[in-house]
């Protein structure tokens, strides 16, 4: 399932990224799940999203809501890798909903307990 892009105002550049070791564990799966759960019921979680991401989420909510509802509950969130960009951690996950194909999502830019980026580049 392809969902609309949720992006922070600043573009994510991975030009300085280094792929982490395969034995590494993801740190942001719980927050990603909480974001999907919240958005699926029509709310952008201000406690998890930095201002620019929250604004983007609110603007894109009408387009995202039908796709998330159609996808149904999350069956699995699988950590794929982490990368560093501009001294910030970004993690990529495969998200599998009850209905539809899995999709890859990146979450990161954690600052003051809130994320600045959550996006999908398609499968």
Image: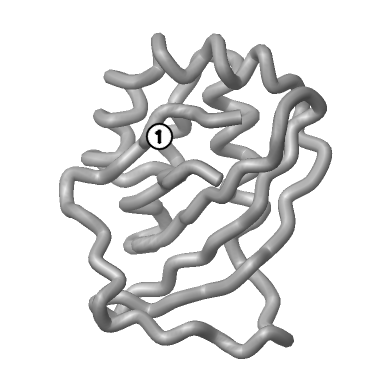
Q: How packed is label 1: few (under 14 Cα within 10 Å), some, or many (20 or more)?
A: some
Which of the two residues, 46 or 122, is positioned nearer the viewer here? Answer: 122
Q: Secondary structure at mark 1?
A: loop
In which quadrant is the N terminus drawn?
top right
Q: Quadrant of residue 84?
A: bottom left
Which of the two residues, 53 or 48, is positioned nearer the viewer here? Answer: 53
Residue 75 x/y as whole percent: 82, 38
Q: Is residue 109 left or right of residue 35?
A: left
Q: Is residue 21 above or below residue 45?
A: below
Q: Is residue 93 above or below residue 13?
A: above
Number of numbered discs visible in the structure rendering: 1
Q: Quadrant of residue 6?
A: top left
Q: Mark 1 — residue?
A: 46
Q: Is residue 97 above or below residue 29?
A: above
Residue 100 x/y as whole percent: 72, 27
Residue found 49% across the figure and 83% down from its top: 19
Q: Is residue 56 left or right of residue 118?
A: left
């Amino acid at each position: 399932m392809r969902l609309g892009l949720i992006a922070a105002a600043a573009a994510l550049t991975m030009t300085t990224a280094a792929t982490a070791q395969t034995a590494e564990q993801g740190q942001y799966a719980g927050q990603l799940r909480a974001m999907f759960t919240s958005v699926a019921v029509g709310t952008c979680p201000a406690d998890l999203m930095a201002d620019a991401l929250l604004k983007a989420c609110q603007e894109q909510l009408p387009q995202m809501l039908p796709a998330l509802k159609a996808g149904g509950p999350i069956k699995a969130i699988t950590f794929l890798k982490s990368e560093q960009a501009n001294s910030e951690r970004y993690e990529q996950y495969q998200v599998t909903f009850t209905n539809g194909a899995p999709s890859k999502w990146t979450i990161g830019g954690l600052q003051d307990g809130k994320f600045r980026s959550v996006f999908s580049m398609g499968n």
